[in-house]
Amino acid sequence: MTSRTTAPLSFTLLAAALAGCATPMAQPAPENVVGVPTVDVRRTPMTAALDTVADSYLRLTLETGTHEAGYVDAYYGPAVLMEAAKAAPRDKGALITEARALMSQLDKLTPRLTDPMEKRRTAFLRAQLRAAETRLLMMQGTRFPFIEEAQRLFGVRPALKPLTSYDAALAKIEALVPGDGPLAERVETFLDGFTIPKDRLQPVFDAAIARCRGRSAAHIAMPDGESFRLEFVTGKSWSGYNYYQGRYHSLIQVNTDLPIRLSRALDLGCHEGYPGHHLFNMKLEEQLVEQRGWQEFSVYPLYSPQSLIAEGSANYGITLSFPGAAKADTERDILMPIAGMSPPSDDRYWQLLDATKALSGARLTIAQQYLDGEIDRATAVTLTQKYQLVSAKRAEQSVSFTDQYRSYVINYGLGEAMVRAHVERGNPDRDEMWRRMAHIVSEPTLPSDLKVR
């Protein structure tokens, strides 16, 4: 069971009036804000055929969720469908057969499609069904090599680098944190000096999320009445989680098992909130479920290509919202005083954080070696300490995440790189970058849609 370390925080976002927030939503939106277009949904025989497959996919996803806790990450459709799924779920074998039959139906429909959005809808449904088939096979005991599992579940075949390729990045970090003892210990000790006191977590996260929202709302229109509730919890393998609950509301949880450093406030505020998971789910509900009536988007299966888009856009959203020195400036000028910290005399803290980003791919290589049985768990923990520059406790938490979510780890770094390449292609101005981001989080986007065009 989750143990709360603080009382839940109710936070109505439209009333967030901290400095740095966007123009109140009651006022006319700036011209560069991407709004919600009116969608002319014409009901055709092809639309009806896709709706039938989508309805079956929705029911299949809900029934699959009865076989694995956490498989359904979010659902806000009719409660009667969830109740029916729980009351009489088909067995895993029957669901695998259904998934394959639905993919076959989509294959027959595809050549007859002419509308571009219907084509994207069909491709999305097929990719989600392929992932469902794969996860059901895994529930039955089938194991795929790491790279194949990632491709079948998330739609991407990751290219992994050998761990030795990260040694040069370690050498650069060594120069930033000189001294005796293992580099990971020196880095941990240095970063621990920027830990947010527990009694300051709430106000620091309030301010951080408000600024993440303000920067997002300046470019992407928010649905009226959207909100979230923030909780601090313990006993999790992750550092933060967004539970989208429909009607433009989320529960955001932050794990306090380990001390939370200052850098995580804006990171989690953007990733779990704006323009990350909260905004992503809101725009799908607003534009696809409400505007188009595509009910398949009212359910979000965690092990699916949708997660690469969700995690990639959430991670890239940090840089998009706080480019260049904006993040460091916000932390130094706004968040550090709230946390009761004295700003450092130099930029070494931010230089170190930037330098460690070059090590992110090492996590995938370690996960592949561990899950494919090339190394044991103890070795995975040791390698995580070395190549992620973390303490034994943080390394244990990282490997525990891999134990629980397996190849899901590709979605963060690889997803971010793919979203970045798509948004920044051709060196656009910042308004265009935000417009591209808005399309990613508002449409039936697949990893294959992020190829640089």
Image: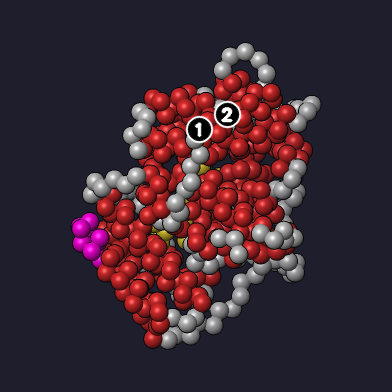
437 on left or right of 325: left
Colour scheme of the picture: secondary structure
- Give yes or no for residue 97 being in the magenta stretch: yes
Asked whether residue 23 is in view, the answer is no
Query: Of the residues shown, which amino acid type is indicated by label 2?
Result: Asp
Is residue 103 positioned above or below 374 on the image?
below
Q: CA distance from mark 2 to mark 1?
A: 7 Å
Query: Of the residues shown, which amino acid type is indicated by label 1?
Result: Leu
Residues at discs 2 and 1 in contact (Cβ within 8 Å): yes
Write the residue at 55% across / 38% down: 360
As helix, strand or loop, the secondary structure at mark 2 comes to: helix
Is residue 326 positioned above or below 153 on the image?
above
Q: Which image quarter holds the C terminus?
A: bottom right
According to the image, label 1 marks what residue?
163
- Give yes or no for residue 235 being in the magenta stretch: no
Asked whether residue 182 is in view, the answer is yes
Please identify the dominant SS of the magenta region. Answer: helix
Nearer to me, 321 or 371 = 371
Q: Residues within 10 Å of mark 1 (few under 14, many from 20)?
A: some
Q: Which mark is residue 167?
A: 2
Give the magenta-colored segment's residue range: 89-98
Write the residue at 29% across / 64% down: 99
Which image quadrant is residue 43 in? bottom left
